[in-house]
Image: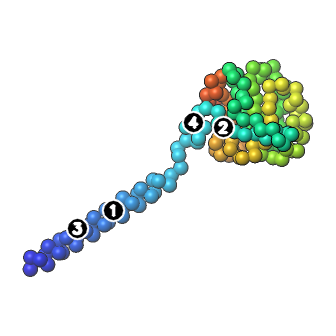
Amino acid sequence: TLWQNNRIIIYANMKKLFLFITMLFSLSVLFAQTEPSQPPYKRFPSVPPFRLLMQDSTTVFTKDDLKKNKNTLIFLFSPDCHHCQHEAGELVKNKDLFKDVQIIMAGTATLNQLQNFYDTYQLSQMENLVMGKDYQYILPSFFMMKNFPFMALYNKKKELITAFEGSYP
C-alpha cells in the first residue's frame, strides 16, 4: 500500500542521511586531531614569555628583563650535548661579533650542571650573556625543538629573524 511504500522510501533516505552524517563526523574528528602546521614560535614570532631561574636559585629572569633596543639570541642547550659545548666555545671565541646582542642561554639541567657549563666554557667573559634554568619547560615546547642546540635570533623589536636547530655550520 501507499503507506508502506512511503515508509520504505523514508527509511531508505534516513539510512543515507545517517551514513552521510557519520562520514562528516568521522572526517571532522580526523581533521581536528591534526597538529598545527607550524610550531608556536613561527605562529607567534615574538620573544616568548619565559622564566629562567638564576644561579642564586631565587632570582627569576623574564622576558620583561630583556634590554630594550637590542637584538636577542635565545640559545637552548644541554650541558652534556657536544654540539652545545662546541657552540658555547665558538660564542666565547667570537664574543666581539656578539657584543651588541644579548644572549639568553636556557637549559633544563640542574643549576649545578648549568654553573659547571658556564665555568667550563668561560661564559663569564661575555657581559651580555645571561644563563638560567627554564624550570617551567616553556621554551622547548614553544620552539618544538627536537635537537640541541636550538637558537632563535630576534631583532630590536623582539621579532623573530631566524631560528636554527642543531649545530650551526
Find residue 167 and report its image quarter.
top right
Label number found at residue 49: 2
Label number found at residue 117: none
Label number found at residue 21: 1
The CA distance from mark 2 to mark 3 is: 55 Å
**In the depicted structure, whether residue 41 falls above or below residue 97:** below
Point 61% across, 32% down: residue: 46
Q: Earlier in the sequence, mark 3 or mark 4?
A: 3
Neighbour tally class for label 1: few under 14, some 14-19, many 20 plus, Cα within 10 Å:
few
Name the kind of residue labelled 3 in the image.
Answer: Asn
Dots 2 and 4: beta carbons under 8 Å? Answer: no
Query: In which quadrant is the C terminus drawn?
Result: top right
Point 77% across, 23% down: residue: 98
Q: Which residue is mark 3?
A: 13
Residue 11, percent from left and from top = 22, 72
Secondary structure, mark 4, is loop
Label number found at residue 44: 4
